[in-house]
Image (cartoon, rainbow, N blue to C red):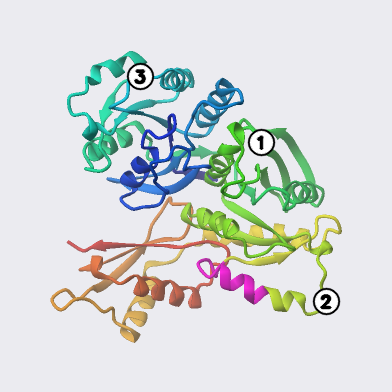
Amino acid sequence: MSTKSAPIVAIVGRANVGKSSLFNSILGRREAIVADEPGTTRDSVTSKANWGSKNFWLVDTAGLKQAADDFELTIQDQITQSAESADLILVVVEADVQITDEDRKVAKMALKSKKPVLLVVNKIDKNRRADLTEWLKLGIRPLIATSTTQRRGIDDLLDIIIKQLPTAKITEDEDRIRIALLGRPNVGKSSLFNALGHKQQALVAQHAGTTRDVNRAVIRYHDREIELMDTAGIRRSGKIERGVEQFSVLRSLAAIEQADIGLLLMDANELNVQLDQKIAGMVKDAGKGLILIVSKWDDFDKDSFSRDRLAPQIAYHYSFAPWAPLVFTSAVTGQNVPKIYDLVMEIDIARKTRFSTPELNRWLRQVVDQHPPAGLKSYQPKLNYMVQEDGTGLPSFKIFGAHTKFLHWSYRRYLERKFREVWPLAGTPIMFWFIEKH
């Protein structure tokens, strides 16, 4: 199987240099909290970004600042984690402040990582006469001057970023399915990892991954190799400790990109947590398969109707991924653990399903005739024909037509709903690309 993953860009720097403002400017929307007080970003914030023809993950990290604990260790941990997981590091400094020791340490460790590094001199609107050549002493080139308030230099920065990044990292391997176990700390990921390792037909290998806190095991199930990745827990905002903990989101994101299917574990005694929903959204945005798993089911005070009562509640909170199957498990008793493997095999088949162009276009004509798309007065969207896209790793389709940019988001959702009525494709997102015919 050939797996593709979007590149990761990490923003690092000392506190209050404008990292979160830069993060929002690159995305073109407000996603990270921005404030004048240093230390507003307490953990890593991630979002999918795109520029030109390339997509990439953008990670806004907590500010590096002098503290009572060992600052050098904090610098080392954060930059080391960036180097392990990111494809490009943006070192952000402040134009109207002289170079500080913290800036020098960040730059030194970023360069030591051997990954591509860009220097972003931010807040140039505060000091238009600043001598930017001083920043070349940090040894990082190229240097890009930006102002997030005036959006100066942002497009130039994005042009340079996409030139430094591959379109996608492609890992060629035998027909192996990769699974990432995801979730908050202490939800039972390691227990399920071990239980899955004992439910297979033959253990092929077990070893520590190159990325810290990702344990891996390769097993064989029905003549297929399946690689399990047990990731570090993603902590809630405000509960992130310094150093390595601040990069738990980034490490898990890297595991999601390496995986074909994500298993989101939720503690049966603490369901419908917003962070769990965020992780599921990350899996969906990455275009990966998803299974929702309620763990520690043996420890839950339940009756014979508990599952029927909880399932609709969980489905409501994960309505953005109604196609994701739900499993109630216990790593202690082994309940439904083998079922996970069966679902993985089904999802793998769904993600590789091929559709003929004639049957796709018969379906398109039928759903458009039933409910034509609405548009503006002079711009009525028309959908003419569709084909399946190759090499994306998930079911993806190009729909050609006119004025497709005026399609309402609700109509796109209608198309997916009608598509899944004919071809359910459980466990995997699907993608529609709308292309102007001319």
The residue to which callout 3 is attached is 99
Mark closer to the chain start, 1 or 2: 1
| Mark 1 Cα shell of 10 Å, populated few (<14), some (14-19), many (≥20) | some
| Quarter of the image that includes the N terminus | top right
Q: Secondary structure at mark 2?
A: loop
Q: Residue at x 41, y 54 (%)?
A: 390
Q: Amino acid at mark 2?
A: Asp
Q: Residue at x 72, y 78 (%)?
A: 308
The picture places residue 372, in percent across and down from the top left corner, at 29, 82
Q: Secondary structure at mark 1?
A: loop
Q: Residue at x 23, y 73 (%)?
A: 381
The residue to which callout 2 is attached is 303
Q: Amino acid at mark 1?
A: Asp
Tag shown at residue 338: none
The picture places residue 52, in percent across and down from the top left corner, at 27, 45
Tag shown at residue 213: 1
Q: Is residue 301 above or below residue 340?
A: below
Residues 76 and 208: in front is: 76
Residues 313 and 367: in front is: 313
Q: Amino acid at mark 3?
A: Ile
Cα distance, mark 2 to mark 3? 63 Å
Q: Is residue 312 above or below residue 200?
A: below
Q: Which residues are magenta?
A: 311-323
Cα distance, mark 3 to mark 1? 34 Å
